[in-house]
């Protein structure tokens, strides 16, 4: 055999053996343990995908299989250096909307035992884009979703045009913001005077007081009618025309005061107030955010909202996602059928928003604020686009595309929306006191 051919065969054989050895060694896992995670859907998770804790790679996916009941079971290998306790949480995370997938783990509850080799845990399944789109598909006889979205933007264009005609200059916007800030400061000073004990005492006593006042007004109205009648004994005594005129004028004023007080009481009973709490989870920075507010609806097509957003310990003005920490909301809303629009102070900045309700217990909404924000020298307002799904009368699910023009964070969360029947009595105290001083 030719010498050069022998050298070539020898070199090729060496490379082949080296490749085989490297492949075998690459599949051998030394100094680790395996756990199995069950998901409803793994969203195209691939073999050998990384497993991370707090962004640090601690292992990889070693095997993917399907259970007899149609669920996905993912076997992962974890380096012995990293200890995971029972009570840990596992979810599939994407580096972006269409980025690579990986499994994110937590270390679990430190007081609980460590996971054993081969132990199975339940993973937290994520909602896929396909499931969201399927939920938006119209049922038989319903209007196409695209047409609904087009109408939403047509209405939004109409609203913004009206706002543009109403606001002539930047001075008008500054004046609106100043008035809103003053209103929130006044509200803060008012609430600071109310202790928890005083509020509880008012709630306990005020409904009974309202009932007593209503009965007193009704009896007094009957007395006035009898006193004003010329056939009554007191009426016949009023022979002096001047005295009779003064007394009748007094009775007229008393009647008007009684009618005003009864009107105030009816308005108090018609008020509806709601506690509005939002718990949002940002998939980009893996953090929860809290919002809390009060919605006051004197009528079905009108409401006022006061609250705070992104409530947390304030170490800076903005968090890592660019959202303002401990910001305030104070705005007025108006309904037009299934469409609601609102405007005022949003996240401590002037802004406005709108929402559209459908017949499938799903509502879409969008908010626009921070119009003075500069990104790379360009003005880019903060825009949130979201969807709200009704589970019960007090529990809703939310999906939010936050800061659509810049960071494009995708958030999911829960919304607790609870009607408080005692708060209207508190808000009615001021109206009743104002009526009594006239």
Image (tube, helix red, strand yellow):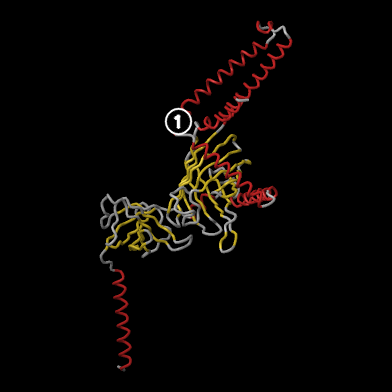
Q: In front here: 107 or 310?
A: 310
Residue at 65% over, 7% down: 234
Q: Is residue 33 left or right of residue 277?
A: left
Relative to residue 373, is residue 48 depicted above or below? below
* Quarter of the image with the C terminus in it: top right
Q: In front here: 307 or 313?
A: 313
Rendered image quadrant of residue 296: top right
How far across and how far down the image is residue 251, in percent? 66, 16
Label 1 environment density (alpha carbons within 10 Å; few <14, some 14–19, many ≥20): few
Dot 1 lies on which element?
helix
Q: Is residue 40 left or right of residue 79?
A: right
Residue at 25% over, 51% down: 113
Q: In front here: 91 or 258?
A: 258
Q: In front here: 73 or 140?
A: 73
* Quarter of the image with the N terminus in it: bottom left
How far across and how far down the image is residue 23, in percent? 31, 73
Rendered image quadrant of residue 429: top right
Q: Which residue is mark 1?
A: 200
Relative to residue 324, is residue 223 depicted above or below? above
Which residue in the rendered view is the most extreme toward the bottom?
Answer: 2
């Amino acid at each position: 055999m030719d010498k050069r051919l022998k050298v070539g065969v020898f070199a090729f054989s060496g490379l082949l053996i080296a490749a085989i050895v490297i492949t075998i060694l690459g599949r051998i896992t030394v100094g680790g343990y395996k756990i199995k995670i069950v998901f409803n859907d793994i969203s195209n998770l691939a073999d050998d995908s990384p497993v991370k804790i707090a962004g640090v790679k601690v292992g990889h996916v070693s095997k993917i299989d399907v259970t007899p009941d149609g669920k996905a079971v993912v076997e992962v290998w974890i380096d012995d250096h990293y200890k995971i306790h029972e009570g840990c949480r596992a979810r599939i995370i994407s580096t972006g909307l269409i980025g690579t997938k990986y499994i994110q783990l937590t270390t679990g509850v430190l007081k609980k035992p460590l996971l054993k080799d081969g132990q199975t845990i339940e993973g937290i399944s994520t909602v896929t884009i396909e499931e969201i789109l399927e939920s938006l598909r119209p049922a038989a006889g319903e209007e196409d979703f695209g047409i609904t979205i087009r109408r939403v933007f047509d209405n939004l264009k109409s609203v913004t045009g009206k706002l543009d005609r109403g606001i002539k200059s930047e001075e008008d916007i500054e004046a609106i913001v100043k008035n809103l800030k003053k209103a929130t400061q006044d509200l803060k000073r008012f609430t600071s005077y109310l202790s928890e004990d005083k509020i509880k005492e008012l709630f306990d006593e005020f409904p009974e007081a309202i009932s007593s006042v209503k009965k007193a007004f009704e009896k007094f109205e009957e007395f006035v009618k009898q006193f004003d009648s010329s056939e009554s004994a007191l009426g016949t005594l009023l022979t002096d025309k001047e005295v009779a005129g003064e007394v009748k004028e007094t009775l007229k004023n008393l009647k008007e005061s009684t009618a005003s007080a009864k009107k105030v009481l009816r308005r108090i009973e018609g008020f509806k107030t709601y506690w509005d709490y939002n718990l949002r989870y940002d998939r980009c920075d893996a953090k929860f955010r809290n919002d809390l507010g009060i919605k006051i609806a004197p009528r079905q097509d009108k409401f006022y909202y006061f609250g705070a957003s992104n409530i947390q310990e304030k170490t800076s003005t903005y968090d890592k996602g660019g959202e303002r920490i401990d910001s305030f909301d104070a705005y007025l809303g108006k309904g037009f059928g299934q469409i609601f629009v609102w405007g005022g102070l949003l996240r401590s900045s002037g802004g406005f928003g709108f929402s559209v309700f459908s017949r499938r217990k799903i509502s879409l909404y969008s908010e626009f604020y921070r119009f003075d924000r500069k990104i790379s020298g360009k003005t880019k307002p903060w825009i949130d686009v979201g969807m709200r799904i009704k589970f019960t009368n007090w529990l809703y699910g939310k999906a939010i595309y936050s800061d659509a023009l810049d960071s494009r964070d995708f958030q999911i969360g829960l919304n607790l929306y609870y009607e408080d029947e005692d708060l209207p009595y508190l808000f009615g105290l001021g109206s009743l006191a104002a009526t009594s001083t006239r």
